[in-house]
Image (spheres, grey):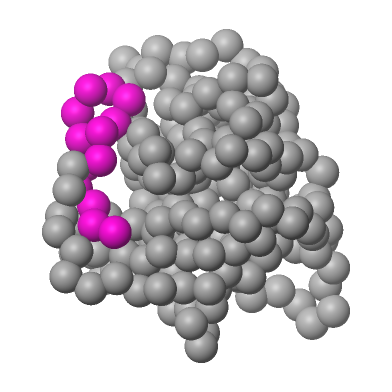
Amino acid sequence: MKYLIPFLLIISTTAFGQSHNDQIALHRENYKQDFVKESHSPLKEADLKDLHFYDADSSYRVTAAVEVLENEKVFKMPTYDGTSKEFYRYAHINLIINGNPVKMTLYKSIALAANPAYKNLLFLPFTDETNHKETYGGGRYIDLSSTDIKDGKIEIDFNKAYNPYCAYSDGYRCPVPPEENDLSLAIKAGEKLYSGEKKHKK
């Protein structure tokens, strides 16, 4: 959802036997077309050539153990335009990425939780050691759903990590990934740096 305009949770149902590479290719094609369809999008059809991604890598599709949190207070997550948005910590997740144990936090948006269409949406913003080099300096996002948590576990596919709208244009309220999701390793999966000229929202 570029975490500003509600973005459909990219198709999670895939044909039986479809390879991971094919799943990611379909995911990315839908992702690109959403820019064209969305009236508030910073990108147009001609800009899509400037979107770049790491090759699909199934080693970045991992299963995480989920610890759902209780009685969490609402807090204001800063955005890159100097404002903030209200979230609460939904769960801690523990996972292994290329042999490295990692702990991260899933968040839930107060505003989107009030919308029946997005009541299950979970937000996983993060930064990593590829930022400012191969990926957007402000970090990347992954959208998940609370309905994907099964028996205390959830699949996290970093191949679906995407840039916030702020990677392409100013004038958007993109949440700043909290320090607790600052990873001390390189996540070479998902969306890379946008190569087009940064736009100015009118």
Instruction: Pick the quarter of the image with the C terminus.
Output: top left
Q: Is residue 112 visible?
A: no
Left or right of 180: which side holds 151? Answer: right
Q: Is the stretch drawn in magenta largely helix, strand or loop?
A: strand
Magenta span: 77-89
Taking the spot 20% from the left edge, 35% from the top edge, the residue there is 84
Picture layout, residue 171 above or below residue 10: above
Taking the spot 35% from the left edge, 74% from the top edge, the residue there is 68
* Percent position of residue 128, x then y: 58, 36
Q: Is residue 13 visible?
A: yes
Residue 86 lies in the magenta stretch: yes
* Percent position of residue 136, x then y: 56, 26
Taking the spot 48% from the left edge, 82% from the top edge, the residue there is 152
Q: In which quarter of the image is residue 195?
A: top right
Left or right of 113: which side holds 170? Answer: right
Left or right of 185: which side holds 149? Answer: left
Taking the spot 60% from the left edge, 63% from the top edge, the residue there is 95
* Percent position of residue 79, x then y: 29, 31
